[in-house]
Image: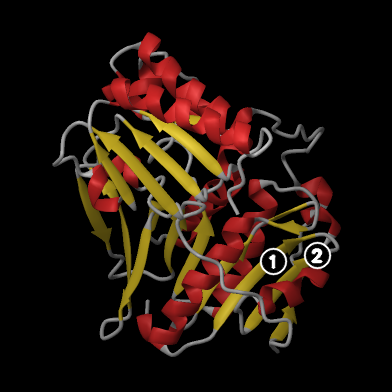
Amino acid sequence: MNLHDYRGVWVFIEQNDRKIEGVSLELLGAGRKLADKLQVPLAGFLLGHEVKSLSNQVIAYGADEVYVIDQPILKDYRTESYMQGVILLARKYKPEIILYGATPNGKDLASAVATDLSTGLTADTTMLDVDVSNRLLEASRPAFGGNIMATILCKKHRPQMATVRPKVMKALEPDAGRKGKIMEEKIDLKEEDMRTKVLQIVNDVTKKASLAEAHVIVCGGKGMGDLQNFQLIHELADTIGASVGGTRDVVEAGWLPHEQQVGQTGETVTPKIYFAIGISGAIQHVVGMKNSEFIIAINKDPNAPIFDVATYGIVGDAIEILPKLIEQFKLLKAEKGGEISYV
C-alpha cells in the first residue's frame, strides 16, 4: 500500500427519510478543520434513494465535494448494500481519512468497511486532530475505564477511520452561497443479491431522545447519597422545567433507567444549562456534558474535578443546598407568572 496515493478528508453523511443526521453536520465542521490543516478537500459521501438533493446542504455546511450513490436498493440502511457503496468509493478515490457518526448505523457501517479494507478504526472518538508532518489522524477517546485519554494512530494502513460521538463536535454555520462539486456513482447490486430485507422500521419514542435534545438538564451523582435524597434532583427539575440525568453509578444503583445516563456509556448532551449535582467529575462523565453552554456544579469537595469544567460552582452539601434552590426557583416562578425563561 502506497500511503501517498491517499488524500482527502471524508465524512459519511448519514440520513434518515432524506433528513441529514445532526452528527454528520457536526463532523463536517470537524472535518473542515482537519482538511484545512492538511490542505486537502473536504468531501461528504451520501448513500440512499432520492437523496441527491441533500448535496447542497452538505456543501453549505463546509464540504468542497459530495459523492452520491442514489439508488432504490439504498432506500433503507442495510450493512451489505451500504458497505459495498462505501468500499467502491474508497477504493476509487482513496481518501486518507473517513469520519462516521457513532450512531448505531454509523458504527455498524464503519466496522464493516474497516474489516473489508483491512484498515484501522477508532471507536467513540471525542477529540480529533492531525499530525500534519506525518499526515496522521489523531483520534482520542477515554480509555481504561475513563481514567486516561488515549490517542490512537493508524500508521500503516489507509484510510484512517474513526467514529465520533454525537454532540462533541460543533457544526459550522451553513453558508447557502458556498459552491462545491457533486459526483455520482453507481453500485452493481440487485435486490435479489441481498441476504437481508427491511420489513419494518420502528421509530424510537423513548425518553432517550428527549434528554439529548433538552435545553436544561439536572444531573445527579452518587454524591446524593441514596434514592430518597435523589428525589431532590427530580424536584428541582420539575420546578424549573428540566430533564433529569444521572451518572453511571446512579443508573447502576437503580435510581434511574439507562436512557437517562449521561457520559461515555450513556448520552452526550449539549444543553443551555447543565446542573451537575453530587458529581465528582470523572472523565467518563465529563465527555458526555462538557460542551454544555453553562455548567453549574454543586459538590462538597472543593477539589472535585467537576469544578474544572464548571461555569459556576457551589461548594457545599447538595442535600442542604437543593431545598433552598428549589424554594428560590418557586418564588421566581411565582413572580414570572409560572414560567422561567432560559433565553
Name the residue carrying label 2.
51
Q: Which residue is depicted at the point 52% across and 59% down? A: 100
Residue 104 x/y as whole percent: 57, 43
Q: Which residue is depicted at the point 67% across and 81% down? A: 175
Residue nearest the observer in this picture, 304 or 339: 339
On screen, 193 above or below 188? Answer: above
Q: Which residue is depicted at the point 40% across and 36% down? A: 265
- N-terminal of the pair, mark 1 or mark 2, is 1
Residue furthest left in the image: 303
Residue 65 x/y as whole percent: 64, 82
Residue nearest the observer in this picture, 213 or 206: 213
* Label 1 CA crowd tier, 10 Å (few <14, some 14–19, many 20+): many
Q: Which residue is depicted at the point 53% across and 41% down? A: 216
79 horizontally vs 277: left or right: right
On screen, 248 above or below 68? Answer: above
Q: Quadrant of the C terminus?
A: bottom right
Q: Quadrant of residue 15?
A: bottom right
Name the residue carrying label 1.
46
Q: What amino acid type is highlighted by mark number 1? A: Leu
Q: Are the two marked residues, 1 and 2, in contact with CB atoms closer than 8 angstroms?
A: yes
